[in-house]
Image (tube, rainbow, N blue to C red):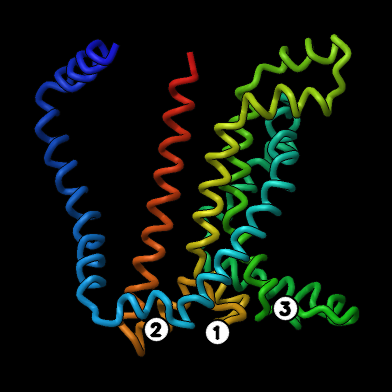
Amino acid sequence: MMMFKSAANGNRIASLGALAPAGVVATVVYVLFIGLPIMALLVRAGQQEGFLAGLTGPLVLQALRLTVITSVISLAVVVVIGTPFALLLARRGPTSRLLRVIDTFVELPIVLPPVVAGVAMLMAFGRNGLLGPALASVGISLPFTTVAVVFAQIFVAAPFYIRAARIGFAGVDPAYEEVSQTLGVSPWQTFWRLTLPMSRPSLLTGATLAWARAVSEFGATIMFAGNLTGRTQTMPLAIMTTMESSLGAALALAALMLAMSALALALLSVLVRRRAESSP
């Protein structure tokens, strides 16, 4: 089987003909363009005398702790709210114009500059925002708090999960769900026993992408939550701060984020491979 796959891949490359050299050159250029900065980061980080100390420094540990906690909370909220929302979008009828518009609107935060998202959240939840006076009347102040970090992460990360979940749910034939319910299985049980398992790879892929986006969030966070050490200073913000005082700590944070991103990418690659292997 592996020999047949290798032969098939070779035939695909050979079918490119005169385009193959251009593809090879483009691949080398891209790999060098992406790989050299990453290699430079790792080399310079390893050359810093305070690198190991920077990994265990209080600033790094506080930023890491805050980033992990807020990103996990954000992901949990995105999954709880985004799953039924994505299911509704996937099962919308051909005449559901409103849901079609909402489906397009969901992806707006992906193309919206994060700084603009932060300003928009200030205009909505800030002291002088649309909901600011109402929130202040009950003693709630969101800007420049840890809750604001979670809000910013949810805003930018949710579309990645919702889009992947919608694609996963849309790939489940509704006929299976109809047959299940005709056999006496409730819609809730059908969802848990049939729809959810069949769309699990897409859900896990979306969750991985959403978590990675939440961890790397910068623009919306600094505009809406600020850069307060131990309170709103996540790892991306800490990198910016430490660049002004300690290159070793900044490189330590950057290397740590690189490792987290690589881990998320590796997990995503495994999920995609399993999905490809399980598909007919």
**Amino acid type at mark 3:** Gly
Residue that mark 2 sits on: 242
Q: Check disc 3 and report its element: helix, strand or loop.
A: loop
Mark 3 crowd level (few <14, some 14–19, many ≥20, 10 Å Cα): many
**Amino acid type at mark 1:** Thr
* Nearer the observer, 178 or 26: 178
Rendered image: mark on residue 229? 1
Label 3 close to label 2 by CB (< 8 Å): no
Left or right: residue 67 versus residue 22 is right
Q: How many marks?
A: 3
Q: Is residue 270 above or below residue 34?
A: above
Q: Name the spot of residue 186 as percent of width and height, x first.
A: 87, 22
Quarter of the rendering containing residue 255: bottom left
Label 1 close to label 3 by CB (< 8 Å): no
Mark 2 crowd level (few <14, some 14–19, many ≥20, 10 Å Cα): some
Q: CA distance from mark 1 to mark 3?
A: 20 Å
Q: Is residue 200 above or below residue 279?
A: below
**Amino acid type at mark 2:** Thr
Q: CA distance from mark 3 to mark 2?
A: 28 Å
Q: Earlier in the sequence, mark 1 or mark 3?
A: 3
Q: Is residue 265 above or below residue 139?
A: above
Q: Earlier in the sequence, mark 1 or mark 2?
A: 1
Left or right: residue 197 versus residue 251 is right
* Nearer the observer, 221 or 43: 43
Left or right: residue 44 versus residue 222 is left
- Of all residues, the one furthest to the bottom in this rendering is 245
Residue that mark 3 sits on: 126
Which numbered mark, 3 or 2, is in the foreground of this view?
Answer: 2
User: What residue appears at the point 67 percent right and 70 percent down from the top-left corner?
Assistant: 121
